[in-house]
Amino acid sequence: MSKAAPTVIVADDHPLFGVALRLGVQRAAPDAQVVAVESFAGLREAITAHPDAALVLLDLMMPDVEGLSALQFLREQFPQVPVALVSAAGERHWVRSAEALGAVAFIPKATPLETTLEVIGLLLAGGCWWPQPESEPVTVASPASRHAPQTLTLEGKLERLTRQELRILLQIRDGQLNKQIAWDLGISESTVKTHISTLLRKLDLHTRTQAAVLAQRLLAGPQIVPDDARNPGQSATTQ
């Protein structure tokens, strides 16, 4: 009995890049059925019609999608379907957030065509793929600056979070209680509290509410959380 041809859903509202992705899928897997959509509404319809899709190539920024909300929807409602994010936004916090939410790949739109074809083939074979972080430029600090306090950008603060801490941050945004987070991650409530205390410290935040606001902005789009989103004068609360 022959194996059924795989179905790949391409969700991208950019006409040229959408066409490039469809052609890429057809070159990587000539027998694949490609379903192209340009909106979240179209994605919902397509995934409902093809719940056994072999892969979803998901544009991070479609008009009716807030940040990673489409990925969250797919992971919650169709956890068996592999999802790869495709985006012009390549900041590390997007990559790490996508990984924490269960995506199988993050493909920057600047990725060379041949590499993209290889990645699509790898994903259809059940693999994962993540771009390598760019190396940090080497700088020589003056003797005085070596002893000055270091001010991290939000990107730098997010980079300090472990994958588990980042996932908990996103769950806090969804309003999940410690008990729910513990059940979902298979850990104890006390461990959840420890993770929350650690991530608050790493982000220079004081309360769970501030963390939820940060995570909401993180999921909403590339212009995220200015440092004035926090209130240093506010006292810490229980997690």
Image: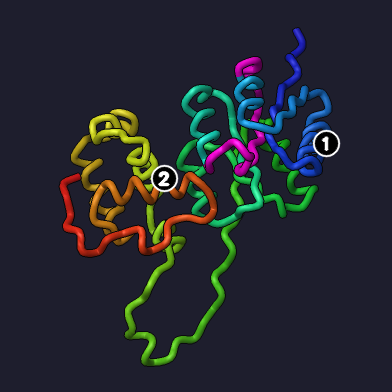
Q: Where is residue 117 shown, x and y percent of the image?
A: 77, 42
What secondary structure is the stretch in magenta mostly built from? Answer: loop
Out of 139 and 154, give the one closest to the viewer: 154
Based on the picture, tell me whether residue 100 belongs to the magenta stretch.
Answer: no
Q: Residue at x 77, y 43 (%)?
A: 17
Label 2 environment density (alpha carbons within 10 Å; few <14, some 14–19, many ≥20)? many
Query: The C terminus is located in which quarter?
Result: top left
Query: The N terminus is located in which quarter?
Result: top right
Q: Where is residue 190 shown, x and y percent of the image?
A: 18, 40
Out of 27 and 9, give the one closest to the viewer: 9
Q: Residue at x 52, y 43 (%)?
A: 98
Quarter occupied by residue 137: bottom right
Instruction: In the rendered structure, find residue 23 and report the number of the disc placed on it.
Output: 1
Question: How far apart are the alpha carbons under marks 1 and 2?
Answer: 35 Å
17 to 231, vertically: above or below: above
Magenta segment boundaries in residue numbering? 48-67
Instruction: In the rendered structure, find residue 216 and report the number of the disc placed on it.
Output: 2
**208 on left or right of 33:** left
SS label for mark 1: helix
Out of 162 and 175, give the one closest to the viewer: 175
Label 1 environment density (alpha carbons within 10 Å; few <14, some 14–19, many ≥20)? some
Mark earlier in primary sequence (1, 2): 1
**31 on left or right of 110:** right
Q: Where is residue 116 shown, x and y percent of the image?
A: 74, 45
> Looking at the picture, which amino acid does disc 1 mark?
Leu
Please name which of the two marks, 1 or 2, marks the residue nearer to the observer.
2
> Looking at the picture, which amino acid does disc 2 mark?
Gln
68 to 75, vertically: above or below: below
Instruction: In the rendered structure, find residue 111 and report the number of the disc placed on it.
Output: none
Q: Where is residue 71 shown, x and y percent of the image?
A: 54, 35
Q: Residue at x 60, y 43 (%)?
A: 60
Residue lying farthest to the top in this orientation: 1
